[in-house]
Amino acid sequence: AAACIKRGEVMINGSVSINEAAQVHANNIVTLNGCMLKPRPFRYILMHKPAGTICSNIDEVYPSLFNYLDVDNKSELHIAGRLDADTTGLVLITDDGHWSFNITVPTKLCQKVYRVGLSKPIGDDVAERFLSGIQLQGEQNLTQPAILEEINEKEVLLTITEGKFHQVKRMFSAVGNRVVSLHRERIGKIQLDVDRGAWRYLTSNEIQSFNQ
């Protein structure tokens, strides 16, 4: 591609471009030797992350969850809201940076729902404290209001709209408890619906739910 650009074979909106770093926008017309080039469509993927994998494009201490993904050009993909190696559940994978921004930026208040296993029974006042905001160690501001639903005394559903580092684990540590299992069930309106290690492409409605 770089050689074609240097030879002047690429045109943007009818003008020869020899700048390899030229910005191309969606409404630009790009041609190569007179033939119009069409941009490759963005990809939007849902995956059920297994435990013992990392949210990275490459293997590190743990294997990459991308090993489960059978698509081309994996290096162009990124994860919208990463999970720790020991955390399981829903991850969304894409090559559309604007779309993933709508999921991860705190001001969008995108809900993430986690099923949390705890080492001790949940305290009577924890739901109210989470709704009011928790002071995490090393943070200046309280967490955004979070919704806690008790499944049983040691298992809860937690809905948060932020994605601070180790946030769920730190929230329960702040109220004297410890997370022993963590599983993400939902992001926004998208519910996890595939088996561990499996993946699928998102539907058009699911994609559009983060463009509103």
Image: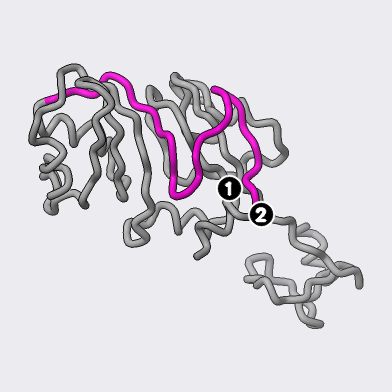
Measured in 3D between alpha carbons, the distance from the residue under mark 1 to the one under mark 2, in whole angstroms, is: 7 Å
Q: Which residue is mark 2?
A: 42
Amino acid residing under circle 2 = Phe
Q: Position of residue 58 (x, y in %)?
A: 54, 31
Q: Quadrant of the N terminus?
A: bottom right
Q: Position of residue 80 (x, y in %)?
A: 47, 46
Numbered mark located on residue 94 in the image: 1
Span of residues in magenta: 177-203
**Residue at 58% from the left image edge and 47% from the top image edge:** 94
Q: Nearer the viewer, residue 34 or 115?
A: 115
Q: Position of residue 20 (x, y in %)?
A: 68, 65
Give the mark nearest the N terminus, 1 or 2.
2
> Cβ–Cβ below 8 Å for labels 1 and 2?
yes
Task: Give the side of residue 16 with respect to residue 201, left or right.
Answer: right
**Crowd rating for badge 1 (residues with CA inside 10 Å; few <14, some 14–19, many 20+):** some
**Magenta includes 206?**
no
